[in-house]
Amino acid sequence: MLGCSALFGYNSGMDSAAQLTAFDLPPELVQQVQRWVAQAADVTRLEAELKLSKIKIEALVHEIAVLKRLRFGASSEARAADMKDLFDETLAADLAACEARLEALRETPPEAPPASPRRPRAGRPALPAHLERIEHRHEPESCTCGQCGQDLVKIGEDVSEQLDIIPAKFFVHRHIRPQYACRRCETVSAAPVPAAIIDGGMAAPRLLAWVTVSKFVDHLPLYRIEQIAARSEVPLPRSTQAEWVGRIGVALAPLCDRLIERLREGNVLHADETPVEQLDPGRGKTKRAYLWAYRSNTLDADPPIVIFDYQPGRGGQYPQAFLKGWKGMLMVDDYGGYKALFGGDIGELACLAHARRKYFELHQANKSPVAAEALARIGELYALEEQARDVSVKVRAELRLQYAQPRLEAMYLWLVQTRKTVADGAALARAIDYSLKRWPALARYASRGDWPIDNNPIENAIRPIALGKKNWMFAGSEAAGKRAAVVQSLLATARANGFEPLTWLADTLEKLPTWPNSRIDELLPIRKQAAAQA
C-alpha cells in the first residue's frame, strides 16, 4: 500500500499545503492528509526524544549504582571517622541530585492521565511527632463535578508534610521596675533586680546558653558566632563572648564537681585521653595539653556520666590524682600512663575493639585469612553482646559463662598456635602479640555480667571533642582549658541522658544564681530529670 507521500507525490522539502492544493483535492481530504503528516512528524520527534531519555536514564541509573556502592560498600569502613562523615555527606548530595534528575526524566508527560497519588518514598523517616504542626488547607477551585455538574462529596484527605525552620531571632527583654516614693519617710521602693550569672550583663540566660552550645556542641568558633549575629545587625564581639564563656565555666564548676562525685560512686569506669593545643605566650606558640575523659559504665542502671579533666600533660600522675581513693574496674587502652593504677584497688579491663581494629586493618590491606579468622571469632563475641544488650546482669553473666568464655579460651589457644607460624616483625605478628599481651584484661569482661567488652563508649564521647578541636584551634591558658572542660563535661552528660543541651543549659543558668547548694543534684543533667523537663 502506498503511503501518503507516494500517493500524492508529496515532497517533504516543499510546503505541504501548496503540494496538496496543486492536486485540486477536496478540502476535507487535504486537511486529513495534513493531520497525518503532522502526526508522522510528531512521532519521529517523540521517538528521538524517547531514545535520548532512555540513554540519559541508563547513565543515571549506572551513576546511582556506583555512588551507592561507594557509600554503602565495605570499603567505607576503612575511612577515618571525620573523613567518612565528609565523604558520606558528599555522596549523599550526589545521590540526591542524580535521583532528582532521574525522577524528572521519568515524570509522566502532561498529556497523559493524572497518576495515582505517589506513595511516600521508602526509607524516609517520619518527621518528629513533637514538632509543632501548622496546617495549610488546599481546597479545589470548584466543588462541583467538571463532567456532570453534580456536587462533589469529600471521601478523604491527602496529607503531606514539609519540615521548615525559623532561624535564630535576636530580641530584647525590656525590664521595667517602677519606683515608688514615700513623701513622709522620703524613701524609694522598687522591685529588686534578680541575681544573674553575669550581674548587670546584657546577655539573657538563653543567649549565654546559645553561645556556649554553639561553641562546644556545634563546634563554631567565636568569630563565626560573631558573623551570625552581625547578619542580624547585632554586635557580638568575640572578646565579649569569650568573657561570657569564662564566666559560665566558673558558675558551672560546682555542678561539675558534684558530677565527679557521682561518677566515682560507680565501680566500673571507662577512661581515655585526647590531646589539645594550649597557647604558650612565653614561646609565642602552642604546647600540647590533654583532656582526660572518664565515663560511667554503660551496663549500669545508673544514668550515664561523662567527665573531662583538663591537664597540662599525659603523665600517669593525672589519672592517679583523679582516681585517688577510688576502687573498681577501669576500662582503658594499652597506654602506659594507666599501668601504675593497677594491682591494688583498681583492676584492668582491656578494649576488645582495639584488638579487633588491628586485624581489621590487616584484612583491609591484604585480605589476610588469619585476620579474617580473628575477625570472625571476635564477631561471635560481639554478636552475643548484642543479644544480651537488654537482659539483666545475672542473665548476661550466665550467657557469657556459657557462650563467651569457651570461645575466648578457644581463640587464645588458636592465637598461640598461629603465632608460632608467623615471622617476628610481621604486621600479623604484632597484631597477635598485642592480643596475647593483653589477653587476661581482654577476656576478663566475660567473668561478670556488668563489665563492658570494649572502650567504645568513651571513644564516642571524645569524638565530638576531636571534631571541635579543629575549630577551637587551642586553649588560651590552662585555666581556660579547665573551665572549658567543666562546660564540656556537663553538656556531654546532658546529651548522653537525652537532654536538649540548649534547653537544659538555659534553664540551669537562669536558676543557678539563687539555687541552694543542698539541692544541687536537682540541676544535674542526669536521666531522672529528663521526664520533668519534657
Image (cartoon, rainbow, N blue to C red):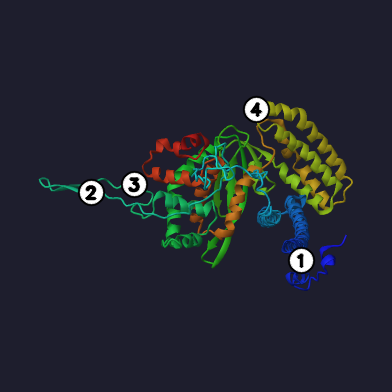
CB-based contact (under 8 Å), mark 3 and mark 4: no
Q: In the rendered structure, are the residues bearing label 1 and label 3 in contact, judged by CB atoms less than 8 Å apart?
A: no
Q: Which residue is mark 1?
A: 25
In the picture of the structure, the residue carrying the numbered disc 3 is: 195
Of badges 2 and 1, the one in the foreground is 1
Q: Earlier in the sequence, mark 3 or mark 4?
A: 3
Q: Residue at x 72, y 64 (%)?
A: 27
**Where is residue 485 shown, x and y percent of the image?**
52, 50
**Quadrant location, the N terminus:** bottom right
Nearest to viewer (mark 4 / mark 1): 1
Residue placed most toward the observer, 110 or 282: 110
Q: Which comes sooner in the sequence, label 2 or label 3?
A: 2
What crowding class fits label 3: few (fewer than 14 Cα within 10 Å), some (14-19), or many (20 or more)? Answer: few
First in sequence: mark 1 or mark 3? Answer: 1
User: Observer-nearest residue: 25 or 398?
Assistant: 25
Task: Please tell me which residue is depicted at 53% across the width and 43% down the height of the picture.
Answer: 144
Residue 396 in the figure: left or right of residue 436: left
Tell me the tag on residue 256: none
Identity of the residue drawn at 85% across and 39% down = 414
Please say if 45 is above or below 183. Answer: below
Q: Nearer the viewer, residue 78 or 117?
A: 117
- The amino acid at mark 1 is Leu
Q: Is there CB contact under 8 Å for labels 2 and 4?
A: no
- Whole-Å distance between the Cαs marked 4 and 1? 95 Å
- Spatial CA distance of label 3 from label 4 is 47 Å
Q: Secondary structure at mark 3?
A: loop
Q: Residue 392 shows which numbered tag?
A: 4
Estimate the spatial distance between the alpha carbons at disc 1 and disc 3, rounded to whole Å: 101 Å
Q: Which residue is mark 2?
A: 178
| Rendered position, 451 above or below 115 | above
